[in-house]
Amino acid sequence: MNKIGVFGGTFNPVHKGHEITAAGFYKKFKLNKLIIIPANMPPHKWIGEKVSALQRFEMCGLCFEKYRRDYNYDIEVSDIEIKKDGVSYTYDTMKTLRKIYPGDAIYFLAGSDMFLYLEKWYKYKELLEMCVFTIAFRNRNDFEQAEILRMRENLISRGYKIEILNNHPFEISSTELREKIKNCGPDSPDLKNYISPEVINYIKERKIYVLQ
Ligand code: DND
């Protein structure tokens, strides 16, 4: 039985928080494969239309390519949600993946912010039945971490599989980075601390986020 990791997100844009967390996920769970899935339309927020799903997908490709090339990770950026019109519910994606990987364990990775409102996700119980839900910490807030552990215990007692990545949080968000690019431009020197150079070049060439 293989272990397939899945990391879904809007990735608007993909940044080093995503990257480091995904690499840690791959290593900690000794994954045989990791699939990065940019959402077409995320169910929980309006993202506008100025940066297309295809552009978010291409940025993910550029960002994760080096893990395949330099570290030999089996990482794929999938267009499964982008090819499907409409809202990208994780439950639907997981059902499709279950058919592709019938006998394998599927680990779905999400940040703590997403996990905390998991009970509002579309068909979350059915989703949890199909995967090992894995939580990455996004910050060092003790109160939040205690709440995550409490929720995890509760879900485990109901028979679901919930894991914790136990990562050192890299505290950055796509929202902050879009603001930074808008206010300081894509040449802002500290941007490279947060976004990989390939992705910065893409942002510059396409002039995205600058006027938004
Ligand atoms: P986001 O828009 O939060 O992604 O979406 C996360 C995933 O959850 C997507 O696949 C959504 O379709 C799915 N979702 C959400 C809500 C409801 C449902 C599904 C449903 O089916 O009903 P971002 O691009 O903002 O971030 C991608 C992931 O990376 C998220 O899990 C986020 O928490 C995490 N993340 C970080 N993790 C560690 N360190 C950081 C991070 N920044 C973002 N600095």
Image: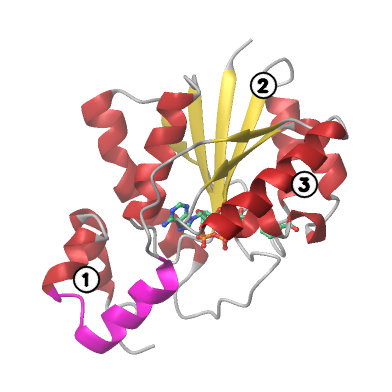
Residue ID for mark 3 = 91
The x, y position of residue 17, in whole percent, is 37, 53
In front: label 1 or label 3: 3
Evaluate whether residue 61 shows in this view.
Answer: yes
Residue sitting at 38 percent across and 36 percent down?
23
Considering the whole magenta stretch, tell me its main secondary structure.
Answer: helix
Judging from the image, what secondary structure is the residue with disc 1 in? Answer: helix
Check if mark 2's residue and mark 1's residue have beta carbons within 8 Å: no
Q: Earlier in the sequence, mark 2 or mark 3?
A: 3
Task: Pick out the residue farthest to the top.
Answer: 1
Which quarter shows the C terminus?
Answer: bottom left
Identified by mark 3, the residue type is Tyr
CA gap between label 2 and label 3 equals 16 Å
Q: Quadrant of ligand 1?
A: bottom right
Give the magenta part as a residue range: 173-188
Is residue 131 found left or right of 211 in the rendered image? right
The x, y position of residue 5, in whole percent, is 55, 31
In this view, 82 is above or below 44: above
Scheme by which the image is coloured: secondary structure
Evaluate whether residue 82 shows in this view.
Answer: no
In this view, 137 is above or below 48: above
Disc number at residue 105?
Answer: 2
Neighbours of disc 2 within 10 Å: few (<14), some (14-19), many (20+): some
Residue sitting at 46 percent across and 60 percent down?
11
Residue sitting at 76 percent across and 38 percent down?
153
